[in-house]
Amino acid sequence: LGILRAGTAEVRMLLGSSSEEFVEQLITAAVEGPRGRMSVSSALQRAISGLGDTPPHGTREVLLFFASITTADPAEAPLESMAVSLRKHRIRVSVVSMSPEMYALKQVCTATGGRYSVALNSSHFREILHGHLAAPVCTADALVPKLVRMGFPRQVIEAAIPAACACHLKPQVRLFVCPQCDARVCRVPGRCPTCELPLASATLIARGFRQLLPPAPFVPLVASASTSAPASTTSARDSRCCGCQLPLGVGSECLQCNSHF
């Protein structure tokens, strides 16, 4: 998360999966308010340096929320010259603008394979933003297949005496223990600060898999009542959710296994 103020790009949060920390940093930046003139070129340069360590099997994407009609870029790094460096580092730039279209910035998006969209109102802004939630399409030339060695840490609760995490050196109640060096970190996914082993969890792996290969849409039970089996042949498990086994009220049916959720 970077904030464009006073001609620089302030990095408020590194790449991660903590939505609570992301929202907190975003609200803090909004309360502080704008300061000086903004520079898109400085932001893209910071993105190049920040995404430079991304492994070749990962995607590199910049999503810029833009609400200005000008950009104060340094003379030695104009916005028009950024497309070459971005393509060299395989970085895709997309813009959601709340101001009139800027030609130079749109050319950067087009050259890097991104999208430039102008929001007409608040509902249109949310629609455009939701369009960026899906994972971008990856071609065979853009990614290099590679086996990734990672660890699945176990979670421990230090309820009696909070212990300091190795990443921030702050007392934490909930910690994750690295399976390789036994270092304790406060969140996953991430990289162990001691042995540099990538840390993940089965839940996050499954969530990422389902984002890349989403399941077929479920059918509401009310809409599928006419095509379902007769009541006499319906098993007792249909009255409970197949996932949590709680009594099923209004639910949906999976078309692949005919289970109810």
Image (tube, helix red, strand yellow):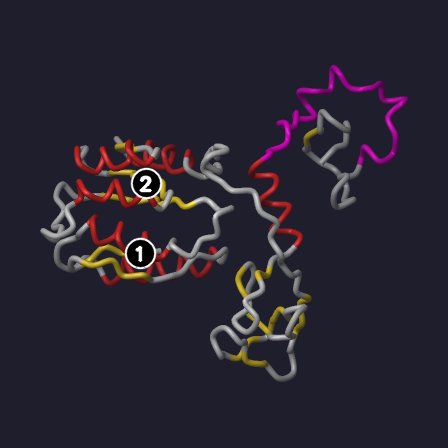
Marks 2/1 in contact by CB < 8 Å: the verdict is: no
**Quarter-wise, where is residue 162 in the image?**
bottom right
Residue shown at 71%/25% (left/top)?
Answer: 255
Residue shown at 49%/79% (left/top)?
Answer: 169
Q: Is 45 colored magenta in this rendering?
A: no
Q: Which mark is residue 2?
A: 1
User: Horizontally, is 124 left or right of 170 in the view?
Assistant: left
**Quarter-wise, where is residue 235 in the image?**
top right
Question: In which quadrant is the C terminus drawn?
Answer: top right
Q: Nearer the viewer, mark 2 or mark 1?
A: 2
Q: Which amino acid type is shown beneath numbered disc 2?
A: Arg
Question: In which quadrant is the N terminus drawn?
Answer: bottom left
Nearer to us in this view, 196 or 100: 196
Location of residue 116 in the rendering, given as x and y in whole percent from the top left corner: 28, 33
> What residue does disc 2 label?
87
For the residue carrying disc 2, how many other residues have a C-alpha within 10 Å: few (<14), some (14-19), or many (20+)? some
Location of residue 244 in the rendering, given as x and y in whole percent from the top left corner: 75, 46
Q: Which residues are magenta?
A: 213-239
- Cα separation between marks 2 and 1: 21 Å
For the residue carrying disc 1, how many other residues have a C-alpha within 10 Å: few (<14), some (14-19), or many (20+)? some
Disc 2 or 1, which lies upstream in sequence? 1
User: Horizontally, is 83 left or right of 90 in the view?
Assistant: left
Nearer to us in this view, 104 or 125: 104
Q: Secondary structure at mark 1?
A: strand
Location of residue 243 in the rendering, given as x and y in whole percent from the top left corner: 74, 42
Q: Secondary structure at mark 2?
A: helix
Nearer to us in this view, 28 or 168: 168
In the image, residue 12 above or below residue 65: below
Residue shown at 68%/66% (left/top)?
Answer: 154
